[in-house]
Amino acid sequence: MEAASLPATRPKPLRVLQDWLSKYGLIVVLLAMPVYYGIQDLSDDGNLTRLGGNIVDGLSNGAIWALVAIGYTLVYGIIELINFAHGEVFMIGSFTAAGFFGTVGLTAGMGVPGLALGLLLTLVVCMVVSGMLNVMIERVAYRPLRNAPVLAPLITAVGFSFILQNVGILWRGGSQEGIPDLINSQHELFTIFGLDITNGDVLSIGTTVPLVILMVTFINQSRLGKAMRATAQDPEAARLMGINVDTTISLTFLIGGMLAGAAGLIYALYQTTIWYAQGFTAGLIAFTAAVMGGIGNIKGAVLGGVIIGIIQQISDNRIGTEWTPAIVFAYLVLIMVFKPSGLLGEETREAG
Amino acid sequence: MSTALQQRRTQVAIFIVVLAGIIVLPLFFNPASGFVDDCTLALAYITMALGLNIIVGFAGLLDLGYVAFYAIGAYTMGWLASGFYADADIHIGVTGFAENLPGIHLNFFLVLIAAMVFTTIAGIIIGLPTLRLRGDYIAIVTLAFGEIIGRVAINGDEIKFSEGFPLTNGRQGITPVDKIDLPFVDQFTSLNLRPWYWVALGLVLVVLFVNFRLRDSRLGRAWIALREDEVAAISMGIPAVKTKLFAYGTGAAFGGISGAFLASYLNTVNADQFQFSFSIFVLAMVILGGLGSIWGVVLGSVALTFINYRLIPDVLNDVPNKVGLDFDLTELSFGIFGFLLVVMMVLRPEGLIPERRRQMELEEGIGAGDTELELVEP
């Protein structure tokens, strides 16, 4: 396929260069920024603390993106649709969290056990709300269009994303809103190698890792997970084997939505500001992460999320926050140029 | 044979009558009225949607970053026909008011040509990385480019070629922008919108003509062949790279034309205009009207423009008051737009006026609808 679009005869050295680029180009591109700034740090300060700080912050941010990216990857893997409303599901997760804090009366001054219990409860609520919302979106906007032209569900996805953004505006207004810093997220918990680890970092990574392990185990071990993988590979054959494809697709949306809800809660606690437009940016970033890791691949989504988080943090810190989105998207384009199948590339039906 | 000829004649006759009606339409309204304003916007959006239709409808390359071409077209107007670069003193082909102003002032038609050149180049640059990709991946790359250009527009006041020559004016916007200046026509002002309307209509007619001729040309057939089955098309000897880049280039050029016109019409080139939602707005016009169907796209653009600028702000806004509810519907306009998109797509996924070829496919069950679970057709 690709070969046909390229000139048939190509001088040999170029061919070698091309092979090399498609193999290592992406890795070189990804390493360029940390290495450059690492050298700069070494020559300026004599140590790597600043870069290390960026990476720690990037990891905890990236953990949030990873959770959202898994939702994209699962859905894309199974019905090959970019679920544009997914970012908004994440946003609704954050809003639910903020609303629930108020309802239950969680405050920053509470004791640790009460707070932990309350947050756990909030986590469950956010996951349920976002998961159900995602299932509902699939039912209303995607399922009726299974046999429609390819682009139709994409438009309904965007339509739903607009609707949910508007729900966000009506719910909590159109501007950024600070919420109580329940976990004292910037508080320094401990220091290793001169790097400050804050409460927020611990929360973010401490929630993401178990959730991801749980999900991967579920998908790899359980019957339903097996059904999901089978449907992703070949829906027709899966149906012939007696798998209820509709239920499986709903389940996929449920899991994706639940993870997005969890990410919403972590985001709210970590950033302590929420607003209706957060989902749009988060959605694009998480999709970039999913594509970077190789869409359809859960480990890839996590890896991509973490890498994007680090890139973002370095760019925020060194180049300026206003340029960060442009840099993330420039990376996306470069990934597409060098390795469309992503880092851990899994061939989807479409690409293969 | 004779019936076909007769049919053709009636079609032409209907077209001429409708066209005449459209030409004289603004004469029945106050020249500064909101209706003429909406019509002019609709015409500008038709130009844009027809451009996107070439990329998405004809060639089947899903472009989610079309706003990039709007931005480049508009900035071309901002750079070449405003007082933004006050230190430069270049006047070509301008008369009247703009002649004595500082800055670069080029005749509108020169700017149009420049905008077409710039956007065509941009289209090809954006198209290049997508050549190896398929389907949704193309969408993501174009989306990324659209976002990058939007970001550059917002932060462009930091990028300076030399002192006093920044790339853009960020969120402050480049304003005022020169008005179109034509001999023998009334002054183009914000109080008399009729000349704007007629120029926009002229642009639409040119673009329509080009669209029809392209669709029926060898190139147009190549686009459709690539869209339907890339492997088959390539093995039949269609040069995929050239054909796809042509689609990006022409589609982008139309966006540039419309962008330059809108910059002059809206009298500002502001970075906030160039957001992702605009790409979706134009894409929705194309998909709603019917992918690849020229008249469908025209209808889709008019419908969405009027929904967005008239129905939602002017008509629906009064509804809550009338039924005794006290809330502001303008807050909901985004959601209503989204809701309408969902409803229209669920009810009529093939668009208002589907392209004949696609309709045949849907009816005969070739392609989409082949099996119950054929979810994506590459």
Image: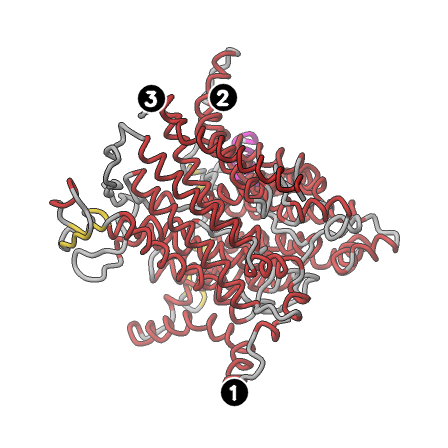
Residue B234 is situated, as x and y percent measured from the top left of the image, at 63, 69
Please identify the dominant SS of the magenta region: helix
Gap in angstroms between the C-alphas marked 1 and 3: 67 Å
Specify whether residue A205 is in view: no
Q: Give the residue type at disc 2.
A: Leu
In the rendered image, residues at marks 2 and 1 fall on the same chain = no
- Disc 3 is placed on an element classified as loop
Q: In the rendered structure, find residue B316 and report the number of the disc placed on it.
A: 2
- Residue shown at 45% from the left, 38% from the top: A180
Q: Quadrant of residue A55?
A: bottom left
Give the residues in magenta: A93-104
In the rendered image, residue A97 lying in the magenta stretch gets the answer: yes
- Disc 1 is placed on an element classified as loop
Residue A257 is situated, as x and y percent measured from the top left of the image, at 64, 45
Residue B211 is situated, as x and y percent measured from the top left of the image, at 50, 50
Single out the mark in the foreground, 1 or 3.
3
Q: In the rendered structure, find residue B30 and report the number of the disc placed on it.
A: 3
Q: In the picture provided, is A324 more to the left or to the right than B355?
A: left
Gap in angstroms between the C-alphas marked 2 and 1: 64 Å
Q: Check if mark 1's residue and mark 3's residue have beta carbons within 8 Å.
A: no
Residue B91 is situated, as x and y percent measured from the top left of the image, at 16, 52
